[in-house]
Image: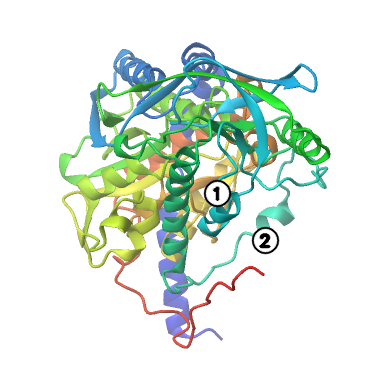
Amino acid sequence: MASVACILSTSVFITAVAADQADLTTINRIVDEGFNRSHLPMTAAYLTDRIGARLTNSPQMREAERWTQQQFRDWGLKNVRTEGFEFGRGWSIEKSSVRMLKPRIAEYRAIPVAWTPATNGAISASIVVAPMTKTEDFERWRGKLRGQIVLVTQPDTGSEPAVAPFARLNREDIGKMDVIRQPLVSMDEEVEKRLERVRFEAKRDEFLASEGALAWVRKSYRDGGLLHGEGYMHRRDQSPKLPGFELAAEHYRQLARLAKAGPAPTLELVSVVHYHDEDSKAYNVFADLPGRDAKSGYVMAGAHLDSWVASDGAQDNAAGSAVVMEAARILTTLGLKPKRSIRFALWNGEEQGLYGSFDYAERHLVSRAPLDSPERASLPPYATWNLRWPVKPGPDYDKLAAYFNLDNGSGKIRGIYAEGNIAVTPILKTWLAPFASMGADAVVAAPTYGTDHVPMSAVGIPGFQFLQDPLDYGTRVHHTSIDSYDHLKMEDLKQAAVIMASLLWMSAERDEPLPKRPLPSKPLQTDPFEYEVLERPTL
């Protein structure tokens, strides 16, 4: 026989779940609008085919900021606006090419590394393979680089993929994610490693320039002719001195083999790139669907609008941006008047370290103590947020009732990451139940990182990233030269927009805000007996 306490507990749980039953009538209307009159294909095509790559503070990103605001206004959203934050220089590619001139003529696949300077005409010189991963490597090459193009990556032998490049999740895959993971608080070695990487890029550029090298080339970190071109020295006072290129892995290895056999090949590099210093601020874009009750706060959906430049930034993250915009269009078109306001956000500077969403969090949601190290303070906020204590509530901390983010490609939504928020799990399961026939009913406990829900979730606000089918996002599309419209799955994106709009509606209509986790305070080190691991010298 069950105890009275157990019966009461079960009764309370059932009552709470009953109170959170999905609004099926409204969901029917959302499904109809989202599947039968979707604007997603045109929105995604404009962002990718028409505007193209949207590097933070580039002319293309400025156009995306303007166009998305106008779309929101045309659809009837209110209070459409931007908020600016300090970022640095814009940068864009006009044209580039890399050719081998000796021992034969060959066209190579390559891309300038973001924020490196132009070649100012063609650079033709022999190569030297001089791998450099730490400052101690510089001495080995001192006096040997003048007048040459330096290949800075350690050559390898390549690899064939061991798994299929395209995948969808099954129930077993999803089940493995439904595990609470206790946080691991260690020494702040990871921040020091990140600092060292930032320092090293600048030190290597300084060393190569002082040695009279003409340019440097790195190997792509994926095979198959894929290119990326990421670079992070976007502050004006950080701008590199030498042109930098990323070369397709297969071509890089060919050059390394030829150099080993001798004589060293001759390369020709051309990079016509431009810095844009008209405005050092980057801008988040916002639009609101006003609520009936101004005192009840707001819920929010977001995705990052910026991308890298090797292709058109389709899966990463025109896909998420188009879904957020489509959810806004659906809810506005249906004439819905939610209790809470619904805010739609298109973030900027995500690719360089979640700049835009962290700026919003610190401007509206919480305040954190400043870092006492200027060097650490120069890092992107994503690298240092968990070092800044105490955390204090800001003006919107109690107003933001829920945040939903989409940024893992164009795969269909299979569920949502609960981010360790135990109290919200049964509510989300109830809300997702109507979408089981669409394959989207999982609520998994595991957290996920690296995108714009982190600033919200990290301070206890119910901030969620959707669980999506991976498709070929991580294997060959993420940040690469094939991240174009062709890799978007429109049926999946329409499903995602319907689900996002539905969850926004239900969280905006809920009597109470979704349960928060506690406002974080500084944690103790997980292992108080841990010793720092000192790097052993290379023999």
Q: Is residue 484 above or below residue 247?
A: above
Q: Say what amino acid the circle numbered 1 marks.
A: Arg
Q: Is 245 or 162 nearer to us in this picture?
A: 245
Secondary structure of the residue carrying tag 2 is loop
Residue named by callout 1: 142
Q: Which mark is residue 306?
A: none
Q: Which quadrant holds the C terminus?
A: bottom right
Query: Which residue is depicted at the point 41% across and 18% down?
Result: 60
**Residue 441 drawn at (x, y percent):** 59, 48
Query: Which residue is depicted at the point 29% across and 71% down?
Result: 521
Q: Is 183 or 499 nearer to us in this picture?
A: 183
- Residues at marks 2 and 1, CA–CA distance in whole angstroms: 51 Å
> To which quarter of the image does residue 354 belong?
top left
**Residue 281 drawn at (x, y percent):** 26, 31
Would you say 442 lies left or right of 333 here? Answer: right
Would you say 97 lies left or right of 15 here? Answer: right
Q: Say what amino acid the circle numbered 2 marks.
A: Lys
**Residue 318 drawn at (x, y percent):** 50, 27
> To which quarter of the image does residue 388 belong?
bottom left
Residue named by callout 2: 176
Q: Is residue 111 above or below residue 1?
A: above
Asked if the residue at tag 1 contacts the one at tag 2, i.e. Cβ–Cβ closer than 8 Å, the answer is no
Mark 1 crowdedness (10 Å alpha carbons): few <14, some 14-19, many ≥20: few
Would you say 536 lies left or right of 231 here? Answer: right
Residue 365 visible in rendering: yes
